[in-house]
Amino acid sequence: MWDSASETDIAEVAAAIGDPSRTKVLRALADGGVLPAGALAAEAGVSVSTISGHLARLREAKLLTVEHDGRHRYYRLASTDVARALEELARIARPLPVRSLGESVRAHALLRARLCYDHLAGRLGVALLAALVDGGVLAGTDGSYRITPAGLVELGAFGITTEEFSRRRPAIRYCVDWGENRHHLAGALGAALANRLFALDWLRRGRARRVVKLTDAGRTGLHETFGVPLDWEDPPATR
């Protein structure tokens, strides 16, 4: 039974996230990047003087941290757990109305391939995790994923060794993707794979924030290396 010392103030966090302008701030930082207050004001559609209050509220709720570089201040999500919470909330929230062609294009791009903090999400992230399981790099289902002995060898050949992982972060975690309602890979391995794909130029950042694009070399490479289907972009219902 919970006692008063172990309960958490969910209402405080919910209230901090609940303001539309603050939600836009969190979404803008959901790719794990850092932005100054001016850029976040533009993302939220408010003035620079107004954004300061929103940023203070998000910091009080421990959703944001600030980094100082001389006279400049840069904001980022406080942890990967904040990104995961946003992903989970997106699964139960109603879609925002699409009011322009640009918003429609961006919405489809986010569903196709995006960053969830520092790892791949969207249809591409789901397809990659499924391929890792099908190919024997990972074993397990329903969140109990683990790297197999053969997977260690395969990942090492791809340039990823588990010795590089921080002990402060689990090697494998997952998020339930809000667009696909299936798992995509998070944790240290998810971040390492995304970094490796960028380093190989198999993955590039899109014009819209959080959106990523798989290059032709990446499409071929992921198929030949891990067995990611060449038609991963097609919605499951149309395959």
Image (cartoon, rainbow, N blue to C red):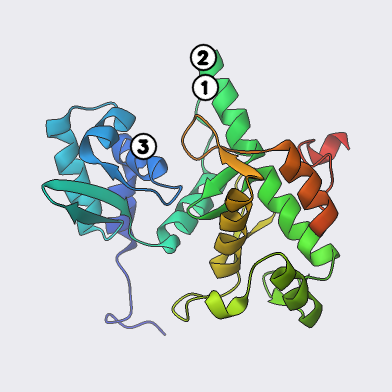
Q: Position of residue 31 (x, y in %)?
A: 46, 47
| Residue at the spot 74% in from the left edge and 42% down from the top edge | 217
**Could you say whether the residue bearing mark 1 is in a helix, strand or loop?**
helix
* Residue beneath disc 1: 103
Q: Residues within 10 Å of mark 1 (few under 14, many from 20)?
A: few
**Looking at numbered disc 1 in the image, what kind of residue is underneath it?**
Glu
Q: x, y (%) of residue 22? A: 30, 41
- What residue sits 71% from the left and 64% below the top? 158
Residue 24's disc number: 3
Quick check: 68 left or right of 204? Answer: left
Is disc 3 placed on a helix, strand or loop?
A: helix
Q: Quadrant of residue 232?
A: top right
Give above or below for 3 relative to 35: below
> Tag 2's secondary structure?
loop
The quadrant of the picture occupied by the C terminus is top right
Counting from the top left corner in percent of width and height, residue 5 is at 27, 82
Q: Residues within 10 Å of mark 2 (few under 14, many from 20)?
A: few
How dense is the environment of label 3, judged by Cα within 10 Å: few (below 14), some, or many (20 and up)? some
Residue 181 in view in this figure: no
**Quadrant of res 162:** bottom right
Which residue is under mark 2? 100
